[in-house]
Amino acid sequence: MLKNLVLPLLFCFALNLNAQTWADDVACIVYSHCSRCHSPGNIGPFSLMSYQEAYDARFAMQYAVTSRNMPPWKADPNYGAHAGKRLLTDEEVALIDAWVNNDAPAGNLANAPAAPVFNSTEEITNPDLTVQIPNYTIPSILNNDLYRVFAIPVTLPGNRYITGLEVVPGNRSVVHHVLVYQDDSGQALAQDAADPEPGYTAFGGIGVFGAKLVGAWVPGSGVQDYPTNMGVKISANTAIVLQIHYPVTSVGQSDNTKVNLRLSDGSMREVVLNPVLNHVTNITNGPFQVVPNEVVTFHEEFTVGQAATLFSIAPHAHLICTSMKAFGITLLGDTIPLIDIPNWDFHWQGAYRFQKPVKIPALTKLHGYATYDNTSNNPHNPNSPPQAIAVGEATTDEMMLFYLAYTGYQAGDENIVVDTSSHLAHHLGCETHTTISGSNEQLEQLDFKLFPNPAGDFFTLETSLEGNALLRLTDFSGRPVLLRNLGGIAEQISIGHLPNGIYTVSMFLENGRLAGSQRLVVLR
């Protein structure tokens, strides 16, 4: 019985816990998959460049990887063949988990791989065009994440094609993600000029009707490029517009992010980035509005006229969205999986490239589905109590877009190789030295509900469990702040001693296996 276990044994799994060490196993995983963001001057909230730093952050690491919140890759890896998947294997997750459960031993540090060295070397070394935002200091009055838009005028001798696009953050410790648009209308330049500070604020997009998305960047992204003789058309006189997400923790810091572009003016096949599936022209069960206290799924449908070659897909929604999925159905009834994001997170969105371009035959029907939770159970709901939410650019509005990067199909396009790896290459070719038996087993999932959420001095937990379990509450840093043995299907949990903030409620079965996690907002 869990009630009879002492605290040091509460989280021990039925694994060989004595073998995992930082030197032999965990350093390789962390240096290969975590340190690029979790290093000085980068976006991670703490550094993971040494054993001591990892030990200090071990509980945050454990939650982040076992919950699959980190590394940030929201797409289902088994739905659609996407390039550059930032994912840990089941065994890598189990190794970190077991290492923390065994008090994170160092091992022989002389056996650990050398820590990586990250620099700001740019991949496009001789760009044909560079656009850079003015030096911008995040205001100290900021009390929420900031989405700042910067418009930079561009004048070229004639129309060109973008064959390579690289976003270079000016301050990697504050730039969370970047969306890059082209705006020929002058609207973005006018809004920028009307704001006394560099740029202007816009949440969902750039606040411009008709602007075209040309690129996106999240930590870990490289150059966005296209096969030979293909590119995105850019007008001779236009504006390159950057929407940059700055977290609330970045107040007082400065940034001067830039974009390097490779351009061509030769005979090119034009790649188009359009929201082919969208809430304006092809929603089938609209109007697109989510009433209070409702969970609703919308459907979009588009029939492809001519065969197309698809390079990437970029879903886009706001805060109350909880899942997004897109696929195609051919005339022969075959399904073409494109993307499935079962747990949508507005703060981690971007473009997903395919390992090989995907052929979309003529008359294929493209389908998009997205679910929206406009109830108080959704901790990301911007309104308390819930309010009616309609389509729009504002924080309290919503969207349902699937941007596709495509061109007209030519024979052989589907054989172009973009990426063949199923797992990112390890730092210095390092390997882990311990094998955990059963690491590929599926975790037993436990259905449980928390309410109210946000909560005040208590919350109620309802579960389908017919037996004992352990509840663990951790704060934003991953530090446990509450442990409680559970034995019933409904229990009231007192949290009056906890400060306001975002917490994680995790449930563990009697064998110590993690059965599920949910976010809990404490707000009084």
Image (cartoon, rainbow, N blue to C red):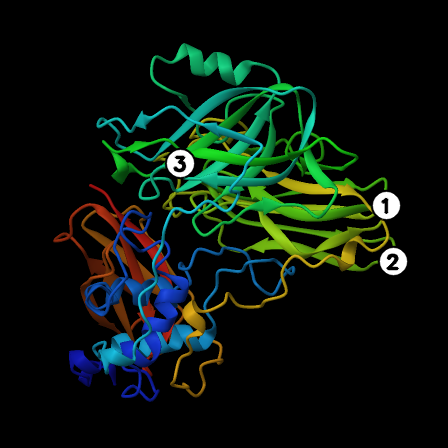
Q: What residue did someone put label 2 on?
A: 332
**Label for residue 363?**
1
Q: Position of residue 447 (x, y in %)?
A: 43, 66
Q: Quadrant of residue 129?
A: top right
Depth check: give the residue in front, 81 or 325.
Answer: 81
Q: Position of residue 252 (x, y in %)?
A: 23, 31
Residue 284 in view of the camera: no
Residue 365 vertical position relative to residue 485 in the rendered view, above or below:
above
Q: Quadrant of residue 173?
A: top left
Q: Which residue is drawn at the image coordinates 48% and 39% (left, top)?
A: 167
Residue 48 vertical position relative to residue 323 in the rendered view, above or below:
below
Q: What residue did someone put label 3 on?
A: 245
Residue 311 vertical position relative to residue 61 in the rendered view, above or below:
above
Circle 2 Cα neighbour tier, 10 Å, few/some/many (<14 / 14–19 / ≥20): few
Name the element at disc 3: strand
Q: Position of residue 361 (x, y in %)?
A: 84, 50
Identity, as a three-letter code, of the amino acid under mark 1: Leu
Q: Position of residue 497 (x, y in %)?
A: 12, 53
Residue 432 in view of the camera: yes
Q: Between disc 3 and disc 1, whose residue precedes?
A: 3
Residue 439 vertical position relative to residue 518 in the rendered view, above or below:
below
Identity, as a three-letter code, of the amino acid under mark 3: His
- Image quadrant for the C terminus? top left
Depth check: give the residue in front, 280 or 235.
Answer: 235
Q: Which residue is drawn at the image coordinates 27% and 82% (left, top)?
A: 12
